[in-house]
Image: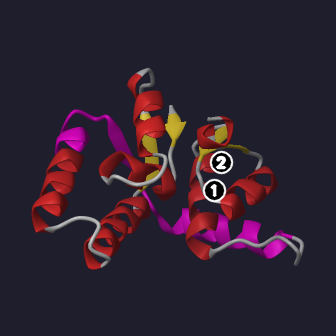
Amino acid sequence: MHYLDTSYLLKLYAHETGSAEVNAWRTGQRGFVCSRHGKLELVSGLKRHQREGRIDAVGLGQSLTQLAADEIRRLIIWLPVENNLFEDACARLAALRPSVFIRAADALHLACAARTGLKEIYSHDRHLLAAAPHFGLEGIDILSTS
């Protein structure tokens, strides 16, 4: 199983810098997971692309149709966001040194990946990657080696 945060998911469903590399990497992989809130972040990211003129309504519809097809084929599985996950994320966040920069949604991604028993999280977000070890995870960005 590979945990993809929204920075990678967006590269799978919208054309942006790094999309070709992430899609090529995806071809040889199986079992992608993300916290359920990542779906909302993904749709928000697609809407941002539309608002900024990078995709039109047809492109947005195609991306959402592909996402739905990938969900049906279980190429992406959304992990539940339950109260105990929020509590875990809050506790982990509260225990961090003040110098660790982390956003709330990223803390939720990291706590979800750690709670699922994963050892790695794939992201192109430098702040999430830097915070990953504080959650017992290795942050991996395949784009940094491309």
Residue 18 coordinates in the image, percent (x, y): 49, 46
Front of the two marks 1 and 2: 1
Residue 134 coordinates in the image, percent (x, y): 81, 56
| For residue 49, side relative to residue 96 (left or right) | left
Viewer-nearest residue: 46 or 76: 46
| For residue 115, side relative to residue 31 (left or right) | right
Instruction: Characterize the local packing of mark 2: few (<14), some (14-19) or many (20 or more) Cα atoms within 10 angstroms.
Output: many
Instruction: Characterize the local packing of mark 1: few (<14), some (14-19) or many (20 or more) Cα atoms within 10 angstroms.
Output: many
Residue 110 — which label?
1
Residue type at mark 2: give it.
Ala
Q: Is residue 84 magenta?
A: yes
Label 2, secondary structure: give it: helix
Residue 114 — which label?
2
Residue 13 coordinates in the image, percent (x, y): 31, 50
| For residue 17, side relative to residue 45 (left or right) | right
Residue type at mark 1: give it.
Leu
Marks 2 and 1: in contact by CB < 8 Å? Answer: yes
